[in-house]
Image: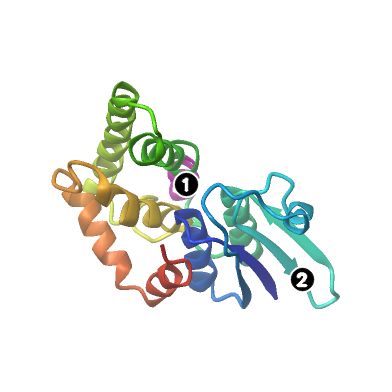
Amino acid sequence: MIDFYCVPTSNGQKIAILLCELGLEFNLIKVNRLAGEPPSDDYLKINPIGKYPSIIDIDSKNKKTTVFETQAIAQYLIEKTQLLLPKKIEERVNSHIWANAVSSGLTPLLGSQYYVQFRSKTNLNEINDWFLLEIKRYLQAFDKRLETNNFLAGDNISYCDVMAFPILFGSVKRLPDDFNNYNNISRWLNSLIGRPSFRRGIEIAKF
């Protein structure tokens, strides 16, 4: 059984979808907190960085494996199950590439841009414009990739599609251009939202 510590963010949705798509049993522990509220001392014992989500995987012998950081959790789960990980080396490499593009590039850019535009009490228009340009660069790359591929890794769905879906499904809608210029991303999103595990995962960690 997996204890899944979750707050309603795109990172929470990524792991919720992944757990559902992999068919893993989990105990959902929804953490209620205010924006900016520090984590509890008990949670810091699980994740010393204090971010969400985190998981504790408890096996049949009661051995506990604690994993935090969204990308690390995803890699742990796909290695554990050997699912959503392409067998062809080219697709496997692309799956890792695009998952990392989401976790190290697009997700922090969108999170920072949200703070600058909607939560900062200072006029940071110049910085916001820079964030928007960087986000556009990533979106163009994702759209180009999906122009000739059904999924980000290639012909078949893999874990990088799960990692990319929540941030593209939710956060991009608040940007000035939305998806007006990204028809391939829109097609890909529509194909994934039809999957029951994706709908359930979004609902579990709903904004």
Residue visible at 13% across and 47% down? 180
Q: Amino acid at mark 2?
A: Ile
Left or right, residue 11 beside residue 119: right
| Residue 5: image location, x then y, percent | 63, 64
To which residue does mark 2 refer?
58
Asked where in the image residue 42 lies, by quadrant, the reply is: bottom right
Residue visible at 17% across and 42% down? 177
Residue visible at 43% across and 58% down? 162
Depth check, front residue: 107 or 24: 107
Please tell me whether mark 2 sits on a helix, a strand or a loop.
strand
Q: Are marks 1 and 2 in contact (CB under 8 Å)?
A: no
- 3D distance between C-alphas at marks 1 and 2: 26 Å
Task: Specify whether residue 97 is painted magenta.
Answer: yes
> Is residue 88 positioned above or below 138 on the image?
below
Q: Amino acid at mark 1?
A: Ala
Looking at the rendered structure, which numbered label has been put on residue 99?
Answer: 1
Front position among marks 1 and 2: 2
| Residue 125: image location, x then y, percent | 29, 25
| Residue 174: image location, x then y, percent | 26, 48
Asked where in the image residue 138 lies, by quadrant, the reply is: top left
Task: Specify whether residue 60 is painted magenta.
Answer: no
Residue stretch in magenta: 91-100
